[in-house]
Structures are given as C-alpha cells and as structure tokens.
Image: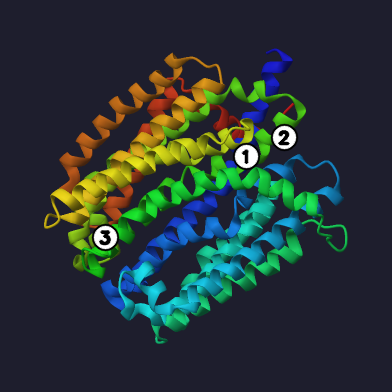
Amino acid sequence: MPLDSRKTKGLFKIVAKDALLTLSTELVLLVSFFVFYRLLVDWFGTVGVGEYSLMRRVLAVLIPIALLGLPEALGRHIAGATEERERSGFIAAGLVILVATTAILGLALNVDESFSARWVFGDVSYKNLIFPFTVLLVGLGSHTFVYSCLRGGLQIKALNSMQLLNLGVFPLLLLLAAHKATFSALIILLGAGHVVTAAIFFIVAVPSSGAMKVYPRFVHTLLRFGAPRLIATLAYAALLSLVPMVASHYVSISEVGYLSLSIALLIGVGGVASPLGSVLLPHVSGLVGRGEVERFERVLYLLIGAVLQTMLFLAGQFVVFVHYVLTVWMGPTFLPAAPIMAVTFSALIAFGFFVVVRNILDAVSTKALNSINASISLGVLVLTMAVIITLWPSGDVAMMFAIALVVALNLLGALTYLSVRKIFAFKLQEDLRHLLWGVVLNAGAVGLALLVKDHVTTNIFLFVIFQVALLATYVVVLRLLNFEWLKIIESKIVFSRTKAV
C-alpha cells in the first residue's frame, strides 16, 4: 500500500479510536438520560418532566448566546496553536467572554421574573423557577466551555471523564439523594454541581503554563471566528427549541413535555454519532493548518456511510418499538407521546448526519455555511408553524408541530450534504451504495421486528437479546458486503495494536 494511502487510513483509525472512546461515554450518558427522566416522572410527575424538558430546550438557545461561538472557536484555535502561551491565551480570552455574557444574561432574566417566566414557560405563574433556571444556565454554560477547551487540546480521556461525571453520574446521584426537595431546589443544586465539577476539570485538566493572561487580540480572534457561527448555533438550537416554546402557549405543560421529551430523546440517540463530530473538528483543523486536508477528503465517504447506516438502524427499530420503549421507560402515563416520538424520529438520519458533518464544515471553510443552512431550515420551520397556527389553531398542535420539525431537520440534513459536496471531491456512487444497502437491510430488519414484536416485548430481557442479535446480524452483513468503515474500525480497535503511520 502506498505511503500516502496508509497515512490516510491511519488518520481515519486515529479518529475512530478517539470516537470509540467518546461513543462509549455517550452510550452511558444515554442510559443515564433514560434513568434520570424515569426518576423525574416518578417523583415530580408529568408536570415536572414538562417543566424540566422545557427548561433544557430554552437553554439550548441561551447557552449559545452565553458562549458566543466559543465551542467552535476554541476547538479550532486551541488545536491550531503552536505555543503553550498561545493556547493559554485563547483559554483565558474564552473565560472572560463566558463570564461577561453569562452575567449579562443572568441579570436580564432576573430583573423581571414575571416577564421571563412568560417567555420561558409561557405562563407567569412559573416565575419562581427563573432563578433556578439561571443557575442551571450558568452550570451548563461552564460545562460546555471546559468541554470546548479539552476538545481543542485533544484531551479525549479528560473530556469524556467530565462528561460522564457531570452529565451522567452526578444528576442521578443528586436526584436519588434530594428527590424529597422541591423542584426549584433540585434545579439549583443541579446547576451548582455542574459549575463545581467543570471548575475542577478546568483547574486539573486544562493545560496552562502558569497564570493565564488575557490578551485583547485573542478575545478579538475568538469573537471574529465564533460570532458569525453563532448564527448557525442559534438557528440550530432554535430548530430544536422553538417547537415546545411556542407550543407552551397553545397546549398544556404535559403536552409540551411530550414534545420536549421527544426532541430530547432525538438529541440523545442522535448523540450516538456525535463522538465523530466531537473529535473531527480539532483533527481536521490540524490538517488544515498543515495543508494536508486532502488526506481527510479521501476517507470522507467512509464517515458519511458510517453515519447513514448507523442512523438508519436506530431510527427503524425505535419507530417499531416506540410504544414498548415508552411503557418501560416512562410508564403508561406517557403513552400519548408515542405518535409524536415516532414522527420525530423520522428525522434521526438527517439529524445524525448534521451533528457530525457540521464540524467538518467549521474546520475547512471560512464561510459560515452552517449558519446559512440552519437559518434556511429555521425559516421553513417558522413559516410552517405560522401556517399551522393560522389555519388549524384548534387541531392537534403538538403533532403538527412535530411534523413541521421533521420537515425542517430533513431539509437541514440535505443542505449540509450539498455543502460538503461543494467543498470536497468524492464519488456520489459510494454514498448511494451506503444509503441503498442501508435502506434495503433495514427494511428487512423493520419487517422482522414487526413480525416478532408481540413476542419479544413480553419481557425486557427478550427485547434486549433480540435487539443485540439483530444489530450483530446487521453489522456482519455489512461486513460481508465489504463496507470499509467497519473493516478499519475493526482493525484499529479490536485487532491492531500498531501505531498509525
């Protein structure tokens, strides 16, 4: 094999190794997500789930404002820094931006709690939740900032340890220990705990050669790169948050909870693909800095194929078993959410693709392509929702809003793919091969699942065994069909102990 080809495959193996570690963390976080919401519904009911889910959706819009594009800017500039002083300078500059913007947002939220409650929850009676909401904003903003610093430094182990502790273990322990506290107190403790854990990882894991100094030029550099991409982040966050926020003015908080929970689960399951995106930005940014991005271009079709074929399987199986999953997870009181969840998950393939590929666009393009694509999709969503509210105000608003979201997310996935094809040269036939075989195999998997559905849902262990066996069969068939992304991951993770050339 030519040296250049070995280097290209070596790059994919390095990314695959980092991604697998992050994937393991994401799977644990997904389990934690299921357990957390189950405990939440047991102790605070459907109203508590609705309130918390709506908080998280609104925070998805506010946290990007607090960070002003720092996740993308820090991920790129820390990875591209050649000196320790430069890395420390970017970190210090980012911290100054975070503190300033968070303070402004916190003050704005609490000046008029009644107004904020009407905006956040759709009802002034929830004004007692504004301060806890602010604490949670500070906590999750701090976590995201430290995560971005660790990602930029390619400290994958530290990054995943913080994710696991702060977003997985800590919320569960808190809910188990403080479930008798009021809902407001629980949210305050949750936000404060996120701040403390993030601060510990910042002190211990973020590299620094002594005291960090704030340089105005580093602040300017981060803002110049991050601010244009804030449009993309906000538009993306609004895509996932606007639906329940607007719905809160037309339906009950429980129905808002159904929508918010469906979107949260879409994000959680779509997060199976996020490890690739998390590690790709600094890796590809490093290639851009060295003028070697063509190495990544030659393996891009493998990444696209891996995402498509993985998301196809997850989407198909969830839609088939959505009623059973909801019954086991949240209890029969949440079964009215099943149709909304099934509809929402029809956007999983496009959503998972966007989650990964948006990082590639940020790494290789100075043009804010994600901002353009997300803004177009958001515009379609807003227009569709406005039509629904105008023409069918007394209809099933929650379901119609879910359909509008699916249309917008699928459009976002299509626009993202077109943007990638404009930048990189790779064969369309390879993408079609991955997609067509994925569709064919998963059509068979869905058909089989429908045939045995009544039998395997009599027992949770039977259900798990069936899903594991079906997934294993799917992977084996893909391997026999010579899909190279599986071969490379297999050789790197399972068999090969040699370093990439």
Measured as percent of width and height from the top left, residue 487 is found at 53, 27
Q: Nearer the viewer, mark 3 or mark 2?
A: 3
Q: Nearer the viewer, residue 127 or 298?
A: 127
What element does badge 3 sit on? helix
42 left or right of 280 in image: left
Measured as percent of width and height from the top left, residue 357 is found at 51, 35
Q: Residues within 10 Å of mark 1 (few under 14, many from 20)?
A: many
Residue labelled with disc 3: 247
Task: Look at the numbered discs 1 and 3 and tell me whether their residues touch, using CB distance below 8 Å.
Answer: no
Q: What's the amino acid at mark 2? A: Gly
- Tell which circle, 3 or 2, labels the residue nearer the N-terminal end: 3
- Tell which circle, 1 or 3, labels the residue nearer the N-terminal end: 3
Above/below status of 1 relative to 423:
above
Q: What's the amino acid at mark 1? A: Leu
Residue labelled with disc 1: 281
Q: Nearer the viewer, residue 299 or 74?
A: 74
Q: Quadrant location of the N terminus?
A: top right
Q: Nearer the viewer, residue 264 or 113?
A: 113
Image quarter of residue 130: bottom left
Measured as percent of width and height from the top left, residue 439 is found at 30, 27
